[in-house]
Protein backbone atom coordinates (compact mmCIF):
# COMPACT_ATOMS: atom_id res chain seq x y z
CA UNK A 1 0.00 0.00 0.00
CA UNK A 2 1.34 3.42 -0.97
CA UNK A 3 1.67 5.94 1.83
CA UNK A 4 0.46 9.44 1.07
CA UNK A 5 3.31 11.41 2.65
CA UNK A 6 1.76 14.77 1.82
CA UNK A 7 -1.45 13.78 3.58
CA UNK A 8 0.50 12.79 6.69
CA UNK A 9 2.36 16.10 6.66
CA UNK A 10 -0.91 18.01 6.27
CA UNK A 11 -2.44 16.09 9.19
CA UNK A 12 0.62 16.82 11.33
CA UNK A 13 0.46 20.49 10.45
CA UNK A 14 -3.28 20.59 11.26
CA UNK A 15 -2.74 18.92 14.64
CA UNK A 16 0.09 21.30 15.47
CA UNK A 17 -2.02 24.31 14.52
CA UNK A 18 -5.31 23.23 16.17
CA UNK A 19 -4.09 21.46 19.28
CA UNK A 20 -0.49 22.49 19.66
CA UNK A 21 0.58 18.91 19.09
CA UNK A 22 4.04 18.36 17.64
CA UNK A 23 4.70 15.16 15.66
CA UNK A 24 7.40 12.86 16.99
CA UNK A 25 10.68 13.34 15.17
CA UNK A 26 13.70 11.06 15.34
CA UNK A 27 17.41 11.62 14.92
CA UNK A 28 17.37 9.45 11.79
CA UNK A 29 14.64 11.57 10.13
CA UNK A 30 16.61 14.69 10.91
CA UNK A 31 19.86 13.44 9.45
CA UNK A 32 18.34 11.99 6.28
CA UNK A 33 16.85 15.37 5.46
CA UNK A 34 19.95 17.29 6.52
CA UNK A 35 22.28 15.16 4.39
CA UNK A 36 20.07 15.74 1.35
CA UNK A 37 20.41 19.47 1.92
CA UNK A 38 24.17 19.11 2.54
CA UNK A 39 24.65 17.24 -0.73
CA UNK A 40 22.90 20.01 -2.63
CA UNK A 41 24.58 22.94 -0.89
CA UNK A 42 28.14 21.79 -0.17
CA UNK A 43 31.16 20.71 -2.15
CA UNK A 44 31.60 16.91 -2.49
CA UNK A 45 34.40 16.89 0.09
CA UNK A 46 32.22 18.74 2.61
CA UNK A 47 29.29 16.42 1.99
CA UNK A 48 31.47 13.32 2.44
CA UNK A 49 32.80 14.76 5.70
CA UNK A 50 29.22 15.33 6.92
CA UNK A 51 28.29 11.74 6.02
CA UNK A 52 31.17 10.34 8.04
CA UNK A 53 30.28 12.52 11.03
CA UNK A 54 26.61 11.52 10.85
CA UNK A 55 27.70 7.87 10.83
CA UNK A 56 29.52 8.45 14.13
CA UNK A 57 26.64 10.38 15.63
CA UNK A 58 24.15 7.67 14.63
CA UNK A 59 26.00 5.05 16.67
CA UNK A 60 25.06 7.03 19.76
CA UNK A 61 21.80 8.81 18.85
CA UNK A 62 20.25 6.45 16.28
CA UNK A 63 16.51 6.00 16.95
CA UNK A 64 16.44 8.75 19.59
CA UNK A 65 13.39 11.00 19.55
CA UNK A 66 14.52 14.59 19.16
CA UNK A 67 12.16 15.71 21.92
CA UNK A 68 14.22 13.54 24.29
CA UNK A 69 17.53 15.04 23.18
CA UNK A 70 18.85 16.62 26.37
CA UNK A 71 22.04 18.21 27.71
CA UNK A 72 22.65 14.98 29.62
CA UNK A 73 22.62 12.92 26.41
CA UNK A 74 25.02 15.37 24.80
CA UNK A 75 27.37 15.19 27.79
CA UNK A 76 27.31 11.39 27.72
CA UNK A 77 28.18 11.50 24.02
CA UNK A 78 31.01 13.93 24.62
CA UNK A 79 32.39 11.89 27.54
CA UNK A 80 32.40 8.76 25.40
CA UNK A 81 33.87 10.28 22.23
CA UNK A 82 36.65 12.20 23.95
CA UNK A 83 38.14 8.87 25.07
CA UNK A 84 38.38 7.82 21.42
CA UNK A 85 39.14 10.96 19.40
CA UNK A 86 40.60 14.43 19.89
CA UNK A 87 38.55 17.30 21.29
CA UNK A 88 38.54 19.03 17.91
CA UNK A 89 36.89 15.99 16.30
CA UNK A 90 34.22 15.90 19.01
CA UNK A 91 33.53 19.59 18.42
CA UNK A 92 33.15 19.08 14.67
CA UNK A 93 30.63 16.30 15.32
CA UNK A 94 28.68 18.49 17.72
CA UNK A 95 28.74 21.28 15.14
CA UNK A 96 27.09 19.04 12.53
CA UNK A 97 24.42 17.93 15.01
CA UNK A 98 23.71 21.52 16.02
CA UNK A 99 23.64 22.69 12.39
CA UNK A 100 21.17 19.93 11.48
CA UNK A 101 18.85 20.86 14.34
CA UNK A 102 19.00 24.56 13.51
CA UNK A 103 18.37 23.79 9.83
CA UNK A 104 15.26 21.78 10.73
CA UNK A 105 14.01 24.54 13.03
CA UNK A 106 14.60 27.21 10.40
CA UNK A 107 13.65 25.48 7.15
CA UNK A 108 11.08 22.90 8.24
CA UNK A 109 9.73 24.73 11.31
CA UNK A 110 10.30 21.74 13.57
CA UNK A 111 9.75 22.61 17.21
CA UNK A 112 12.72 20.68 18.60
CA UNK A 113 15.29 21.52 21.28
CA UNK A 114 18.94 22.20 20.53
CA UNK A 115 20.96 21.25 23.62
CA UNK A 116 24.32 21.45 21.82
CA UNK A 117 25.35 25.11 22.34
CA UNK A 118 27.77 25.49 25.22
CA UNK A 119 28.84 21.83 25.16
CA UNK A 120 31.98 22.11 23.03
CA UNK A 121 35.35 21.13 24.47
CA UNK A 122 38.44 23.26 24.73
CA UNK A 123 40.94 22.65 21.97
CA UNK A 124 44.63 23.54 21.74
CA UNK A 125 45.66 26.38 19.47
CA UNK A 126 45.83 25.34 15.84
CA UNK A 127 49.10 23.90 14.54
CA UNK A 128 51.33 26.38 12.74
CA UNK A 129 54.48 24.96 11.13
CA UNK A 130 56.50 26.98 8.66
CA UNK A 131 59.92 26.86 6.99
CA UNK A 132 62.81 29.23 7.00
CA UNK A 133 64.11 30.57 3.69
CA UNK A 134 67.14 28.32 3.98
CA UNK A 135 64.94 25.25 4.46
CA UNK A 136 62.85 26.20 1.45
CA UNK A 137 65.98 26.31 -0.72
CA UNK A 138 66.91 22.80 0.41
CA UNK A 139 63.39 21.52 -0.20
CA UNK A 140 63.22 22.98 -3.71
CA UNK A 141 66.64 21.54 -4.51
CA UNK A 142 65.57 18.05 -3.45
CA UNK A 143 62.21 18.39 -5.19
CA UNK A 144 64.03 19.01 -8.47
CA UNK A 145 65.62 15.56 -8.10
CA UNK A 146 62.26 13.73 -8.19
CA UNK A 147 62.14 12.16 -11.69
CA UNK A 148 58.61 10.82 -11.24
CA UNK A 149 57.27 14.23 -10.20
CA UNK A 150 58.55 16.94 -12.58
CA UNK A 151 55.73 19.16 -11.33
CA UNK A 152 56.83 19.12 -7.67
CA UNK A 153 59.27 22.03 -7.77
CA UNK A 154 56.78 24.30 -9.54
CA UNK A 155 54.03 23.32 -7.11
CA UNK A 156 56.16 24.16 -4.07
CA UNK A 157 57.26 27.51 -5.53
CA UNK A 158 53.70 28.45 -6.42
CA UNK A 159 52.35 27.41 -3.01
CA UNK A 160 55.05 29.37 -1.17
CA UNK A 161 54.39 32.51 -3.20
CA UNK A 162 50.58 32.47 -3.37
CA UNK A 163 49.45 30.77 -0.16
CA UNK A 164 46.96 28.71 -2.17
CA UNK A 165 45.67 25.41 -0.81
CA UNK A 166 46.77 22.14 -2.39
CA UNK A 167 43.34 21.54 -3.92
CA UNK A 168 43.22 25.06 -5.35
CA UNK A 169 46.53 24.54 -7.15
CA UNK A 170 46.04 20.97 -8.33
CA UNK A 171 42.62 21.95 -9.67
CA UNK A 172 43.92 25.08 -11.37
CA UNK A 173 43.05 25.41 -15.08
CA UNK A 174 44.93 27.53 -17.59
CA UNK A 175 41.83 29.57 -18.36
CA UNK A 176 41.98 30.94 -14.81
CA UNK A 177 45.60 32.08 -15.07
CA UNK A 178 45.95 35.65 -16.31
CA UNK A 179 49.66 36.37 -16.75
CA UNK A 180 48.99 39.76 -18.32
CA UNK A 181 47.06 40.94 -15.29
CA UNK A 182 49.31 38.92 -12.97
CA UNK A 183 46.44 37.06 -11.32
CA UNK A 184 45.19 33.57 -10.54
CA UNK A 185 41.39 33.56 -10.52
CA UNK A 186 39.66 31.23 -8.08
CA UNK A 187 35.90 30.89 -8.45
CA UNK A 188 33.69 29.92 -5.49
CA UNK A 189 33.58 26.27 -6.61
CA UNK A 190 37.36 26.05 -6.38
CA UNK A 191 37.80 27.37 -2.83
CA UNK A 192 37.22 25.79 0.57
CA UNK A 193 35.16 28.76 1.76
CA UNK A 194 33.04 28.83 -1.43
CA UNK A 195 34.04 32.46 -2.02
CA UNK A 196 35.80 33.67 -5.14
CA UNK A 197 39.09 35.47 -4.86
CA UNK A 198 41.98 36.54 -7.05
CA UNK A 199 45.57 35.78 -6.09
CA UNK A 200 48.36 38.06 -7.32
CA UNK A 201 51.33 36.47 -9.09
CA UNK A 202 54.79 37.68 -8.07
CA UNK A 203 57.99 37.03 -10.03
CA UNK A 204 58.69 33.64 -8.44
CA UNK A 205 55.11 32.45 -8.95
CA UNK A 206 55.24 33.65 -12.55
CA UNK A 207 58.38 31.63 -13.24
CA UNK A 208 56.72 28.51 -11.79
CA UNK A 209 53.69 29.02 -14.04
CA UNK A 210 55.88 29.60 -17.10
CA UNK A 211 57.74 26.39 -16.29
CA UNK A 212 54.40 24.56 -16.28
CA UNK A 213 53.52 26.23 -19.57
CA UNK A 214 56.72 24.97 -21.19
CA UNK A 215 56.01 21.45 -19.90
CA UNK A 216 52.52 21.59 -21.36
CA UNK A 217 53.74 22.86 -24.75
CA UNK A 218 56.30 20.06 -24.92
CA UNK A 219 54.08 17.14 -23.84
CA UNK A 220 50.34 17.89 -23.81
CA UNK A 221 49.35 21.19 -25.51
CA UNK A 222 45.63 20.54 -25.09
CA UNK A 223 45.62 19.79 -21.36
CA UNK A 224 43.45 22.25 -19.39
CA UNK A 225 45.38 21.63 -16.16
CA UNK A 226 48.32 23.69 -14.92
CA UNK A 227 49.57 20.67 -12.97
CA UNK A 228 49.35 17.71 -15.32
CA UNK A 229 51.23 14.58 -16.32
CA UNK A 230 52.80 14.04 -19.72
CA UNK A 231 49.55 12.50 -21.02
CA UNK A 232 47.66 15.66 -20.02
CA UNK A 233 45.81 14.12 -17.10
CA UNK A 234 45.51 16.11 -13.91
CA UNK A 235 47.94 15.57 -11.04
CA UNK A 236 45.71 14.34 -8.23
CA UNK A 237 48.19 14.20 -5.37
CA UNK A 238 51.88 14.64 -4.59
CA UNK A 239 52.14 13.49 -0.99
CA UNK A 240 54.59 10.66 -1.69
CA UNK A 241 57.06 12.68 -3.77
CA UNK A 242 56.76 15.65 -1.39
CA UNK A 243 57.51 13.46 1.62
CA UNK A 244 60.54 11.93 -0.12
CA UNK A 245 61.96 15.37 -0.98
CA UNK A 246 61.24 16.70 2.50
CA UNK A 247 63.08 13.83 4.19
CA UNK A 248 66.10 14.21 1.93
CA UNK A 249 66.13 17.94 2.74
CA UNK A 250 66.28 17.10 6.44
CA UNK A 251 63.02 18.92 7.27
CA UNK A 252 60.96 17.31 10.03
CA UNK A 253 57.26 17.60 10.86
CA UNK A 254 56.27 19.44 7.70
CA UNK A 255 53.24 18.75 5.49
CA UNK A 256 52.10 20.00 2.10
CA UNK A 257 49.57 22.32 3.76
CA UNK A 258 52.41 23.90 5.76
CA UNK A 259 53.58 25.56 2.54
CA UNK A 260 50.51 27.77 2.96
CA UNK A 261 51.47 28.48 6.58
CA UNK A 262 54.96 29.36 5.39
CA UNK A 263 53.64 31.90 2.89
CA UNK A 264 51.58 33.55 5.63
CA UNK A 265 54.48 33.52 8.10
CA UNK A 266 56.84 35.13 5.61
CA UNK A 267 54.29 37.83 4.79
CA UNK A 268 53.60 38.70 8.43
CA UNK A 269 57.31 38.68 9.26
CA UNK A 270 57.83 41.16 6.41
CA UNK A 271 55.33 43.53 8.02
CA UNK A 272 52.30 42.84 5.78
CA UNK A 273 49.07 43.70 7.69
CA UNK A 274 47.02 40.75 8.90
CA UNK A 275 44.00 41.96 6.93
CA UNK A 276 46.00 41.76 3.69
CA UNK A 277 47.22 38.27 4.57
CA UNK A 278 43.63 37.29 5.35
CA UNK A 279 42.48 38.43 1.92
CA UNK A 280 45.30 36.63 0.13
CA UNK A 281 44.72 33.33 1.93
CA UNK A 282 40.95 33.57 1.64
CA UNK A 283 40.22 33.34 5.36
CA UNK A 284 36.61 34.21 6.19
CA UNK A 285 37.70 36.26 9.23
CA UNK A 286 40.94 37.77 10.46
CA UNK A 287 40.74 35.46 13.49
CA UNK A 288 42.22 32.61 11.44
CA UNK A 289 45.06 34.87 10.36
CA UNK A 290 45.82 36.06 13.90
CA UNK A 291 47.69 32.83 14.62
CA UNK A 292 50.61 34.41 12.73
CA UNK A 293 50.53 37.72 14.63
CA UNK A 294 53.34 36.69 17.01
CA UNK A 295 55.73 36.65 14.04
CA UNK A 296 55.61 40.44 13.85
CA UNK A 297 56.49 41.61 17.41
CA UNK A 298 57.73 44.95 16.11
CA UNK A 299 54.15 45.88 15.16
CA UNK A 300 53.06 45.37 18.78
CA UNK A 301 56.16 47.15 20.09
CA UNK A 302 55.35 50.19 17.96
CA UNK A 303 51.76 50.16 19.17
CA UNK A 304 52.80 50.08 22.83
CA UNK A 305 55.23 52.94 22.24
CA UNK A 306 52.29 55.10 21.18
CA UNK A 307 50.93 55.15 24.75
CA UNK A 308 54.17 55.95 26.54
CA UNK A 309 53.94 58.93 28.86
CA UNK A 310 55.70 62.11 27.81
CA UNK A 311 58.18 61.70 30.69
CA UNK A 312 59.11 58.18 29.60
CA UNK A 313 59.52 59.25 26.01
CA UNK A 314 61.75 62.20 26.95
CA UNK A 315 63.78 59.99 29.26
CA UNK A 316 64.26 57.46 26.48
CA UNK A 317 65.39 60.17 24.06
CA UNK A 318 67.79 61.55 26.67
CA UNK A 319 69.41 58.15 27.12
CA UNK A 320 69.88 57.89 23.39
CA UNK A 321 71.65 61.28 23.36
CA UNK A 322 73.99 60.23 26.18
CA UNK A 323 74.88 57.03 24.35
CA UNK A 324 75.49 58.97 21.18
CA UNK A 325 77.78 61.57 22.78
CA UNK A 326 79.83 59.01 24.69
CA UNK A 327 80.23 56.79 21.66
Image (cartoon, rainbow, N blue to C red):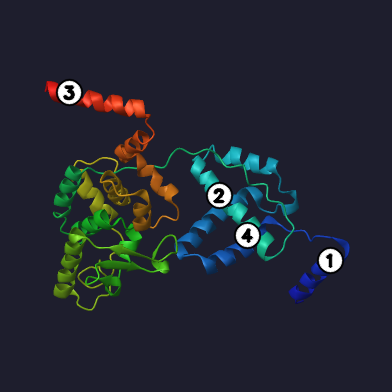
Label 1 to label 4, Cα distance in Å? 25 Å
Mark 2–mark 1 CB contact (< 8 Å): no
Q: Residue at x 16, y 69 (%)?
A: 215
Say which of 174 and 54 sits in front: 174
Label 1 packing within 10 angstroms: few (<14), some (14-19), many (20+): few
Q: Residue at x 52, y 38 (%)?
A: 122
Label 3 to label 4, Cα distance in Å? 72 Å
Image coordinates for residue 100, horizontal then vertical, percent: 62, 57
Q: Which residue in the structure is indicated by mark 1?
A: 17
Q: Which residue in the structure is indicated by mark 2?
A: 93
Q: Which mark is residue 242?
A: none
Image coordinates for residue 187, horizontal then vertical, percent: 39, 69
Q: Is residue 259 left or right of residue 193?
A: left
The residue mark sitting in front, 1 or 4, is 1
Label 2 packing within 10 angstroms: few (<14), some (14-19), many (20+): many
Q: Is residue 53 left or right of residue 246?
A: right
Nearest to N terminus: mark 3 or mark 4: 4
Q: Which residue in the structure is indicated by mark 4?
A: 31
Number of numbered discs overlaid on the protein picture: 4
Write down the quadrant of residue 250 in the picture. top left
- SS under mark 4: helix
- SS under mark 2: helix
Nearest to N terminus: mark 2 or mark 4: 4
Q: Residue at x 69, y 65 (%)?
A: 108
Q: Which residue in the structure is indicated by mark 3?
A: 323
Amino acid sequence: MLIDVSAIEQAEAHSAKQWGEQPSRTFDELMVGYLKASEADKRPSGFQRDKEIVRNLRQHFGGTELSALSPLLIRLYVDHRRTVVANGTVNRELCVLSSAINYARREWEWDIPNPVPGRKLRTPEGRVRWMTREESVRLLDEASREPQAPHLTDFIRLALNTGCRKGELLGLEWKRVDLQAGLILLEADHTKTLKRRSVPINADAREAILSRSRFRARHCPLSPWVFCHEDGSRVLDLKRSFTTARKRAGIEDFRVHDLRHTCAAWLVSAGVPLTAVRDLLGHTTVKMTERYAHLAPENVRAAVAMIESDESRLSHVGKLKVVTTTG
